[in-house]
Image: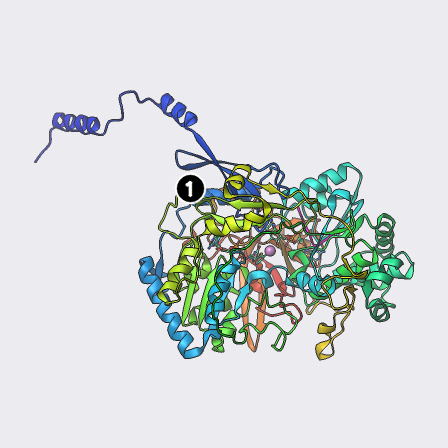
């Protein structure tokens, strides 16, 4: 039928009338209505990184409207960093996994119902446990919500709770746990002198720490930053010392030597509270500041000056214990952490105001659950722990990066990967992809991350953090606070998609495995039980957004019956670690050179670091945060100007970066192109890449293939003492163009 223009217009008018908005509608009243709609404020904690800043989610008309930092929360003092907003907005990112999925081919998935997924997973898991024992089941995780997964592992008899920490910091925690029985934190508020080495609070952000550092600066405290690169923290420091990468151990030992040889150290503290001083000194009495200077490119006079200034200001002075920046990078990382403990102990700053204080932690309660008959656990697949291949690696943390080897060796058959993207954040993505070969791989993410796309057989999406309640957390750790605090996530938004809470995912699987009532509680009940001894309820927590305990964290070395009582064998700070002495190794740190070193004009050590507006792999698909990258041209690799000149590379040029991956008899060459930022602000021996890029999940459309990932160039090795990845024991060659 031909429609005349007249009929068409008439029909259009009718259709328009049929779906017409109320007569009163006009754009101004719409805007006014939106502005006047009631706002609900719900407390939560940011999921942008491990800092867990407390925030208020402001919700209007059922949508996230705004975020505000909780002013009383000490980790962020009311502030949030750029990532908080990008990560929150990702709740609406179209690249989220919106329902459970099952692999049907390479990068091919079909939707599956939750019930069917639980059935199939439970069925496979039961068969694997019956045939190959429960020791072949592993839970690989970012960490957090430990209890839920551990309850399942306890129930079936698997010891394989393995965290991502071996890709982050385990050399630090291992050394501090073994030498001091605790993780101490720097008391920035009262320090007069602060030495930061490989710790950049303004890039590896903790908003509260930066506020404290800036206040300390205002009151005249001295800040010295040691970093091969002019990092963001160095910009506010009194001094920046561009150390040769990989030689911090020499620098720390040079400081220790000066403190001891010039008798600047706290002799009384060492006499009363230290074990193994003689052993340390005997092994290092010839390692002078001059010797250190030859290795680390910081002049001997400067090393001595720093040691003297630290001593002059002690105990209100510290060498910051550090985080990722040194503790996952080198063959010497555990020794670096040991030397850190020693320098601080020589300053006598343990449990002293202005020095190092214990973490402020609330004493949470616990749900009382019925006791269950559980099988004995089999051996650990990852080799961590006494009697295993890596006897000194902490079993609570484990070794994450060699999972494909464990699968190839038949040690792991069924693998759960929770809130962790090892295909991007562990070394050697091509190697990590082999995880897909396990009999069962279940990824529990929020996004179509690389691990889900390339390795998972099932993808079970969790609620986004704004859509769920999570049990309360301490805000303590990393830096010292006077009072413990607890923060907590309440659901701010209704789940947008067909996702579930981890607890419900595990309940579903356990039920199908016929494990009766393994989780006889809800998150609400768990949270209420945790808050009870603190005198708080879900309601008070929801109102305040942050709970502060009245008991102050007090200085004073832990003592019992008049004797030092750290959680070590002697109760003292142990300069020597007996367990490290296996295989003829030393118990004390001594200079250990890097495994590899660059030679010639086109070789560089590949180093990396956080950028203030990105987190690990998780933010590179945020349209807002990637817009920041674009406007700063932020995915470039840094190169020292003198070195760049020799290679004919100018600022903004493209370069080819190449590395040979040699691991367990296998050799491959990796070659990537990246734009270069030419700068004076970097030690000439290295190139530096910001660590958030190199997204290769085709289902994450915003950040796909932007920049490079340091893990692309690193083999998946295991540092024997603590299980770290040694990701900066990597030499790359760089040439201009393709
Ligand atoms: N923006 C942002 N903030 C974060 C995170 C994030 O992903 N993004 N993640 C959080 C987490 S999980 C962590 S672990 C922390 C990490 O926090 P940091 O450990 O502070 O972070 P990094 O940037 O890895 O390392 C710090 C610095 O070490 C320097 N460095 C590299 N090699 C050497 C070396 O050989 N010697 C010395 N002295 N310095 C070296 C780097 O140039 C970098 O500036 O940040 C937390 N905050
Ligand atoms: N390339 C690169 N590698 C790194 C780092 C880096 O900066 N760059 N940093 C190193 C350090 S310091 C660390 S701590 C590790 C971190 O390693 P990862 O834990 O792998 O880090 P993320 O990229 O933060 O998160 C991984 C995945 O968790 C999922 N996820 C995010 N939020 C949630 C949630 O609420 N629930 C669930 N179930 N899943 C969620 C996302 O889908 C995301 O892909 O990586 C280490 N390796
Ligand atoms: S530092 Fe930034 S990203 Fe990390 S928790 Fe705090 S606000 Fe979120
Ligand atoms: Mo980390």
Residue 247 sits in quarter: bottom right
Work out whether 5 lies above or below 679. above
Residue name at image x 40 percent, y 25 percent: 31
Q: Is residue 249 magenta?
A: no
Q: Is residue 187 left or right of residue 445?
A: right
| Labels in figure, total | 1
Chain part drawn in magenta? 196-201
Q: How is the structure coloured here?
A: rainbow
Q: Nearer the viewer, residue 635 or 592?
A: 592
Q: Is mark 1 within 8 Å of ligand 2?
A: no
Give SS at disc 1. loop
Secondary structure mostly seen in magenta is: loop
Residue name at image x 61 percent, y 59 percent: 168
Work out whether 569 lies above or below 689. below
Q: Is residue 633 left or right of residue 230?
A: left
Q: How far across and how far down the image is residue 46, in percent?
A: 53, 45
Q: How far across and how far down the image is residue 381, in percent?
A: 53, 74
Residue 103 visible to an observer of this rendering: no
Residue 386 visible to an observer of this rendering: yes
Taking the view exactly as shown, the residue that stands out farthest to the left is: 1
Residue name at image x 37 percent, y 67 percent: 513
Q: How far across and how far down the image is residue 421, in percent?
A: 50, 59
Q: Nearer the viewer, residue 651 or 295?
A: 295
Q: How far across and how far down the image is residue 640, in percent?
A: 69, 53
**Residue at mark 1:** 493
Q: Is residue 199 magenta?
A: yes
Residue name at image x 56 percent, y 78 percent: 665
Q: Residues within 10 Å of mark 1 (few under 14, many from 20)?
A: many
Residue 243 sits in quarter: bottom right
């Amino acid at each position: 039928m031909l429609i005349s223009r007249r009929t068409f217009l008439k029909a259009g008018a009718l259709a328009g009338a049929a779906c017409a908005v109320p007569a009163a509608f006009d754009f101004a009243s719409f805007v006014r209505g939106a502005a006047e709609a009631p706002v609900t404020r719900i407390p939560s904690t940011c999921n942008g990184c491990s800092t867990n800043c407390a925030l208020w989610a402001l919700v209007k008309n059922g949508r996230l409207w705004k975020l505000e930092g909780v002013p009383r929360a000490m980790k962020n003092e009311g502030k949030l960093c750029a990532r908080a907003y990008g990560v929150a907005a990702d709740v609406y990112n179209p690249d989220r996994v919106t329902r459970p999925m099952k692999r049907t081919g390479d990068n091919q998935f079909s939707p599956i119902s939750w019930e069917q997924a639980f059935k199939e997973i439970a069925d496979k898991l039961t068969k694997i446990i019956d045939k190959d024992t429960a020791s072949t089941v592993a839970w690989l995780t970012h960490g957090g919500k430990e209890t839920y997964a551990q309850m399942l592992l306890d129930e079936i008899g698997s010891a394989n709770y393995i965290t991502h920490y071996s890709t982050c910091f385990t050399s630090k925690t291992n050394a501090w746990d073994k030498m001091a029985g605790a993780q101490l934190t720097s008391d920035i508020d009262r320090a007069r002198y602060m030495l930061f080495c490989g710790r950049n609070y303004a890039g590896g952000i903790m908003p509260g720490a930066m506020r404290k550092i800036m206040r300390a600066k205002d009151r005249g405290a001295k800040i010295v930053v040691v970093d091969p690169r002019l990092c963001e923290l160095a910009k506010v420091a009194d001094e920046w010392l561009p150390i040769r990468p990989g030689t911090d151990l020499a620098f720390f030992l040079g400081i220790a030597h000066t403190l001891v040889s010039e008798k600047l150290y706290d002799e009384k503290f060492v006499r009363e509270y230290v074990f193994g001083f003689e052993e340390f000194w005997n092994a290092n009495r010839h390692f002078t500041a001059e010797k250190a200077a030859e290795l680390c490119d910081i002049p001997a006079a400067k090393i001595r000056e720093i040691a003297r200034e630290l001593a002059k200001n002690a105990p209100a002075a510290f060498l910051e214990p550090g985080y990722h920046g040194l503790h996952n990078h080198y063959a010497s990382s555990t020794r670096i952490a040991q030397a850190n403990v020693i320098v601080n102990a020589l300053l006598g700053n343990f449990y002293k105001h202005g020095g190092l204080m214990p973490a402020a932690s609330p004493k949470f309660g616990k749900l009382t659950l019925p006791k269950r008959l559980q099988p004995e656990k089999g051996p650990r697949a990852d080799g961590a722990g006494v009697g295993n291949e890596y006897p000194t690696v902490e079993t609570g943390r484990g070794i994450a990066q060699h999972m494909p080897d464990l699968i190839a060796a038949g040690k792991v058959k069924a693998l759960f990967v929770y809130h962790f993207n090892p295909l991007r954040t562990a070394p050697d993505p091509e190697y990590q992809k082999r995880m897909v070969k396990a009999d069962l791989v279940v990824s529990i993410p929020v996004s179509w991350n690389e691990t889900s796309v390339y390795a998972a057989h099932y993808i079970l999406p969790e609620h986004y953090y704004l859509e769920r309640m999570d049990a309360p957390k301490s805000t303590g750790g990393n830096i010292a606070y006077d009072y413990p605090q607890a923060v907590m996530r309440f659901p701010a938004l209704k789940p947008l998609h067909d996702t579930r809470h981890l607890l419900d995912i595990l309940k579903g699987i356990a039920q199908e495995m016929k494990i009766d009532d393994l989780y006889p509680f809800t998150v609400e009940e768990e949270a209420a039980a945790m808050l009870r001894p603190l005198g708080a309820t879900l309601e008070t927590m929801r109102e305040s957004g942050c709970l502060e305990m009245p008991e102050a964290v007090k200085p004073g070395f832990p003592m019992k019956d008049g004797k030092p009582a750290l959680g070590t064998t002697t109760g003292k700070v142990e300069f020597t670690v007996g367990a490290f002495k296996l295989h003829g190794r030393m118990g004390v740190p001594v200079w250990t050179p890097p495994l590899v070193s660059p030679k010639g004009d086109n070789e560089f050590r590949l180093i990396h670091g956080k950028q203030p507006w990105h987190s690990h792999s998780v933010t590179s698909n945020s349209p807002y945060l990637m817009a920041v990258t674009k406007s700063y041209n932020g995915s470039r690799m840094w190169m020292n100007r003198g070195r760049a000149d020799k290679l004919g590379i100018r600022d903004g040029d493209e370069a080819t970066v190449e590395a040979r991956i040699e691991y367990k008899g296998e050799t491959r060459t990796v070659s990537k192109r990246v734009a270069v930022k030419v700068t004076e602000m970097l030690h000439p021996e290295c190139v530096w890449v910001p660590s958030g890029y190199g997204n290769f999940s085709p289902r994450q459309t915003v950040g796909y293939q932007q920049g490079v990932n340091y893990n692309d160039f690193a083999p998946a090795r295991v540092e024997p003492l603590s299980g770290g990845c040694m990701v900066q024991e990597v030499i790359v060659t760089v040439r201009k163009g393709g």
